[in-house]
Image: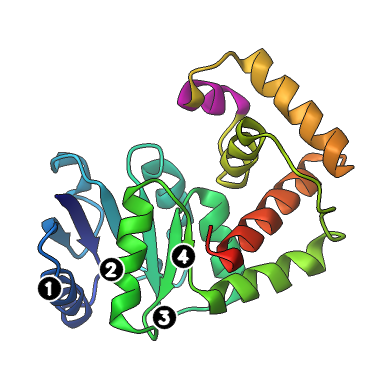
């Protein structure tokens, strides 16, 4: 059973999401709320479905950065703006779905994110890929080792090297070694280029359905 929390400040949308999720026998919505206040008191969640804008003019990026250390977050939003998409992914969201997309995509996204994968629709992956192409030179098609790919994904999600080490169960010095190898293989220098390259590769994987 995949346990799910749904946070959206519009009751009609939130109840609609719950209705869609109820169609899958292996989904259980154990948390439903208008804001983030009750999240910390709820049982462990496999996926937290979170509206990007909760009654505010600013996206809840800081909350995503904090909650992504505890939960697998799937952002759902009316916005398909590249800036919002990039900000959410960098903060640690494992998926992003717009409210205009078909309902069946939500179930697919839930399953991918619950398995600690990364989900974007083809349309959003194209947007992210195009956005990153304007921020950095194209990432060379250089294969990385699985652990290097994992480190790079964590970097894209905004984790520090210490946090990455804890999440992967390795020493920080090992993370440093992985990062140095990534820089050398992808021919990139500063942290901004490293993050951009990480997001670019995530977009490429999403487009390929990986």
Res 107 label: 2
Residue ID for mark 1: 23
Determine contact: label 4, label 1, CB under 8 Å: no
Residue ID for mark 3: 78
Residue ID for mark 4: 59
Numbered disc in front, either 4 or 1: 1
Determine contact: label 2, label 1, CB under 8 Å: yes
User: Vertical placement of 200 versus 98: above or below?
Assistant: above
Q: How is the image coloured?
A: rainbow
Horizontal side of 37 relative to 153 (left or right) equals: left
Residue at the image position 66 percent from the left and 62 percent from the top = 204
Q: Position of residue 137 (x, y in %)?
A: 87, 60
Determine contact: label 3, label 4, CB under 8 Å: no
Cα distance between the residues tagged 3 and 1:
23 Å
Q: Give SS at disc 3.
A: loop
Mark 4, residues whose alpha carbon is within 10 Å: few (<14), some, or many (≥20)? some
Horizontal side of 130 relative to 156 (left or right) equals: right
- Who is closer to the viewer here, 98 or 114? 114
Closer to the N terminus: mark 2 or mark 3? Answer: 3
Q: Position of residue 152 (x, y in %)?
A: 65, 40
Q: Give SS at disc 2.
A: helix
Chief secondary structure of the magenta span? helix
Residue at the image position 60 percent from the left and 62 percent from the top = 86
Determine contact: label 4, label 2, CB under 8 Å: no
Residue at the image position 53 percent from the left and 64 percent from the top = 209
Mark 1, residues whose alpha carbon is within 10 Å: few (<14), some, or many (≥20)? few
**Which span is picked out in magenta?**
161-167
Q: Position of residue 147 (x, y in %)?
A: 61, 31
Mark 3, residues whose alpha carbon is within 10 Å: few (<14), some, or many (≥20)? few
Closer to the N terminus: mark 3 or mark 4? Answer: 4
Closer to the N terminus: mark 4 or mark 2? Answer: 4
């Amino acid at each position: 059973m995949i346990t799910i929390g749904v946070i959206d400040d519009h009751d009609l949308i939130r109840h609609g999401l719950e209705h869609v999720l109820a169609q899958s026998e292996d989904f259980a919505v154990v948390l439903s709320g208008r804001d983030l206040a009750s999240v910390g008191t709820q049982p462990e969640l496999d996926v937290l479905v979170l509206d990007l804008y909760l009654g505010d003019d600013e996206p809840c990026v800081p909350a995503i950065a904090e909650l992504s250390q505890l939960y697998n977050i799937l952002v759902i939003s009316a916005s398909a703006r590249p800036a919002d998409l990039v900000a959410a992914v960098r903060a640690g969201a494992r998926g992003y779905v717009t409210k205009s997309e078909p309902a069946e995509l939500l179930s697919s996204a839930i399953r991918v994110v619950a398995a600690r994968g990364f989900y974007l629709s083809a349309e959003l992956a194209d947007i992210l890929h195009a956005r990153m192409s304007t921020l950095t030179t194209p990432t060379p098609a250089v294969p990385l080792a699985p652990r290097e790919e994992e480190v790079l994904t964590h970097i894209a999600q905004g984790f520090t090297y210490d946090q990455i080490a804890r999440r992967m169960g390795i020493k920080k010095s090992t993370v440093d070694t992985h990062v140095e190898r990534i820089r050398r293989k992808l021919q990139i220098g500063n942290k901004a280029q490293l993050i951009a390259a990480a997001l670019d590769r995530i977009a490429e994987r999403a487009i390929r359905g990986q």
